[in-house]
Amino acid sequence: MKETVAQQPDVYNPQSIEPVWQQQWEAAKTFRVTEDPKRPKYYCLVMFPYPSGRIHMGHVRNYVIGDVVARYKSMRGHNVLHPMGWDAFGLPAENAAIEHKKTPQFWTDENILYMRTQLKRLGLSYDWEREVATCKPDYYKWNQWFFLKMYERGLAYKKMSAVNWCPSCETVLANEQVITRDVTNIGLCWRCDSHVEKKELDQWFYKITAYAEELLAECDRLPGWPERVLTMQRNWIGKSVGVEVDFPLADDKNRAIRIFTTRQDTLFGATFVTLSPEHPMVEEIIRGKKESAAVRTFVERITKQDINIRTAQNMEKEGIFTGAHAINPMTKERIPIWIGNFVLMGYGTGAIMCVPAHDQRDFEFAKMYNIPTRVVIQNPEGTLKSDELTAAYTDEAGKLVESGKFSGLSPNEAIEKIAEFIVSEKLGARKTNYKLRDWGISRQRYWGTPIPIIYCERCGTVAVPYDELPVTLPPDVPITGKGGSPLQADKNFLNVKCPKCGGPARRETDTMDTFVDSSWYFFRYLSPKMDTAPFDTKSADYWMPVDQYIGGIEHAVLHLLYARFFTKVVRDLGLTKADEPFTNLLTQGMVCMETYRCEEHGWLFPGDLIGSEKEGWHCPHCNRPAVRGRVEKMSKSKKNIVDPEQLIATYGADTARLFSLFAAPPEKDLEWNDAGVEGASRFLNRVWRLVTSHAGPGPVSGTDGTERTAALRRVTHQTIKKVTEDLDRNFQFNTAVAALMEFYNAITAQPGDGRDEAIKTLLILLSPFAPHIAEELWKRLGHTGSVLTQPWPRWTEAALATDEITIVIQINGKLRGQIRVPAGLDEKEIQHRAMADGKIKDWLKGQPPKKVIYVKGKLVSIVL
């Protein structure tokens, strides 16, 4: 194929250059990749987007980071897999169907088409032949296949579970559809503002808890992950080793409240027990009590509140006495039973013992409700008194007191001794608990993967046979947002024959949580057209695990945890040898911008403001002062967004890429700055002028051997070293780009000949960051072939060596000058030259030094 060069005047015009190179890359299939055992593989993956309709600057930053990594690794000799696809199922498509009277499929396909075009305009090096969309039957067939495999192994099961239910809309709500509007923190339906209720429904679950211990242990074997993310994963799994202990009811010794604790050393200090409002024994223990009416009112109010708000650190803890008592099994004393808003059924047993002297939350609760406090761990000074505490004593130092035969033990000793006692006396049992709960995958929605289950009155629950997959979504189902799953209304979908007996049966109408789609998509990229298996195992042996995964910190728990779980299941099915999906993880920061607000007109676009920084900004509608808010994540609602399309149309994709990389380290938030965008554009224009003025007919030649050329060659190799090390060291793109800017300055300071090697190197180093301009200028220099196929340059230590060094001169600790001296000059001569320097003589004014100190290769310090 004949290679083309965009015919341009000597003015940088990215709008005409960039499409030419994008078309040429696509026509040449430049980024197509296959397995090549002769080359080291590198699987670079950026979290795939939800096709919402338009990309935003967060997308731009995320995908450009991945693209630079992919291009760089390719130039370093790796066989790079860099795919893209669409996380296409989800609730927004159903909402759009209701609002715009379009089917979710049409709305999603339309958005994918538009967003694919936008991504291509950025010049991203994706192998588009591997594109996947999770809403396509050839993808979600394998969601169903995995479900059946897990069902066979007991990893998929059904049980009753509480869901958010809107009684007005008569439908289940996702957690994100439950909103709060006032201080009551009562959950409301996002659509109609009705009070959301908790309703028990039969739901499907994946048994992720079967892998809890491995998921936790493997966190210690992921050194390429940010410690912050690993901490979040460990906390989410939440392993606790302790005991379960029975607190018998005072009114019925045959009935007991079982609590879980990791601090059995404080059992003697438990002065009350607190139950979750959802605890199944609540109704039993309040029956016949005068407090029952008030308790029921309290329980009804609290259970309507959002659980995340109930457990927030700043949420006020509140409770109510039930009128009932339990027996502390260690002290045999009657202690009151309370119900508290901070206790959840989802962890432990839904009941806790409360030790106000040694737990700050319990202490504050006890003070609020005048519940007794008892010190059972005395500090080393022996100064703690139960009735004089101002805060809970939670230090590990100290000894047990008022704890029977365990008094005198340290807390750590007592934890083990009391656990042994509880087991031997049959008061309870040792127990390891996890905060992690099995993954509820049922959604009463249309736009998701149908769960491949059939219900038959004769045969019960029956799995759809493998040869009948995929169970596809009916295309024309009315979606109203009310009355449960839309699939229930489609009789053709609902009513089927039982695969076992052939009798009448009905399909499961729940669809899968969309996190299922994203939990294994990185495997599907390996063989996206395969129709006999979810992916080719030989391809998985070559490509997996992913070498570099890139995405937002907001996915630190659920998506990443589910992907790890799925990988282990896939491994146990014999389809991969990988234990973990992602070797290295980069969580990039957000793109942020200043916000402005008018008292009358609300949030304002910064670009629409009138006035100036000096005079103050004003609302364009009423001329009132615009109040500057915080720097926040770009958001349509805050009107502090920048449209990537407008940015590319004005400055070009390479400028957008360069700014997003240069403005901040990748893991930090990027604060939008118009001046920074213009600065990136100016730099590329300068590179354009430098190269086009230097370019001549034919290939560039070597160096002219002058002293200046030797110095420039040294800077060239210093830049290669700096950029390479910055990219290898946690992808410090911002400092790498800064080094390229300094390199440009060094080249322009070198007049005439001798710049050929430096300019060639500049374009190669620039190409991962700004590939379009690098390609164009590479051609204009007379090179054949793509700059992307050039090997990454290497520096040599010999080229880095310098004939002269700079010696700093200090007088009484203050910098007063510097001199250049031959690299091998001895200490005595260096001191002599420092003292003889004209500036230093002026500072000394003939005064002899008291002492002269030489730090080899760095400085001469003169003490007067």
Image (cartoon, grey):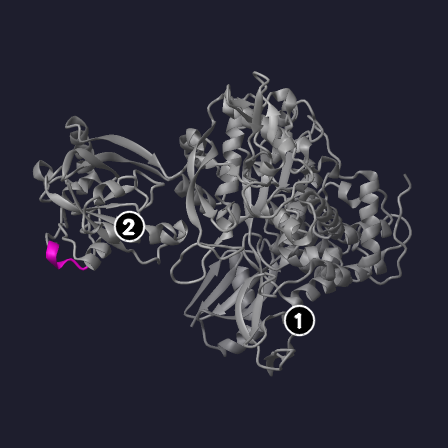
Q: Quadrant of the N terminus?
A: top right
Circle 1: residue type: Gly
Read off the residue under disc 2.
Answer: 296
What whole-number distance in Å separates the C-alpha atoms at marks 2 and 1? Answer: 54 Å
Q: Is residue 343 magenta?
A: no
Circle 2: residue type: Arg
Q: Is residue 521 left or right of residue 322?
A: right
* The magenta segment: 385-390
Q: Secondary structure at mark 1?
A: helix
Q: Using the rendered image of the protein, determine whether residue 398 is visible from the camera's viewpoint.
A: no
- Residue 826 sits in quarter: bottom right
Q: Secondary structure at mark 2?
A: helix
Q: Position of residue 743 (x, y in %)?
A: 69, 57
Which of the two labelled residues, at mark 2 and mark 1, occupies the earlier sequence position? 2
Q: Position of residue 352 (x, y in %)?
A: 25, 43
- Residue 597 sits in quarter: bottom right
Q: Quadrant of the C terminus?
A: bottom left
